Amino acid sequence: QVQLVESGGGLVQAGGSLRLSCTASGRYFSTYTLGWFRQAPGKEREFVVAISRSGLTPYYADSMKGRFTISRDNAKNTVYLQMNSLKPEDTAVYYCAAGSSVRRVINSDEYDYWGQGTQVTVSS
């Protein structure tokens, strides 16, 4: 069993930055593919970015490329999401997720564990 806890959300002005963290309890953190998803009010959950078990391979949604950066520290059981040049349309609850056998990183159904989410609000 893995528990994921996100932190780092908040209110920021357009053009600003935030760094989200997601720390996992339990063992075998390095065996999980990790992903970030987001859900805005009235919209479906949306894939943001994922990272391979080793941390060497990131997978970005096209709209996030160049603005968001994912990284992980397996020694600290933590995955990070650095978000720059934030836009009002980035406003959402951001969730981290972990999966042991993820094949299609954009598919939320393939992740086994989810955090409770952290709110990111970008004002114009």
Image (cartoon, rainbow, N blue to C red):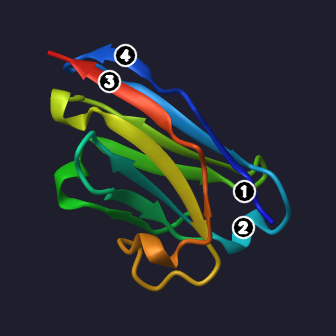
Q: Are marks 4 and 3 in contact (CB under 8 Å)?
A: yes
Q: What element carries label 1?
A: loop
Q: Which mark is residue 74?
A: 1
Residue 108 appears anywhere in the view: yes
Residue 88 placement (x, y as % from top left)? 18, 27
Q: Nearer the viewer, residue 113 or 34?
A: 113
Q: Are marks 1 and 2 in contact (CB under 8 Å)?
A: yes
State which quarter of the image contains the N terminus: bottom right
Residue 90 placement (x, y as % from top left)? 24, 36
Residue picked out by circle 2: 30
| Residue 56 horizontal side relative to residue 106, left or right | right
Q: Which of 76 and 5 is in front in this view?
A: 5
Q: What element carries label 2?
A: helix
> Mark 2 or mark 4: which is in front?
4
Residue at 49%, 48% (x, y): give it: 95
Q: What residue type is labelled 4?
A: Leu
Residue at 20%, 21% (x, y): give it: 15
State which quarter of the image contains the C terminus: top left
| Residue 25 horizontal side relative to residue 47, left or right | right
Q: What residue type is labelled 2?
A: Ser
Q: Callout 4: 10 Å neighbours few (<14), some, many (20+)?
A: some
Q: What element carries label 4?
A: strand
> Which mark is first along the chain, 4 or 2?
4
- 22 up-or-down from 106: above or below: above
Residue at 60%, 65% (x, y): give it: 98
Residue 39 placement (x, y as % from top left)? 33, 47
Q: Which mark is residue 11?
A: 4
Q: What residue type is labelled 1?
A: Asn
Residue picked out by circle 3: 121
The CA distance from mark 3 to mark 2 is 30 Å
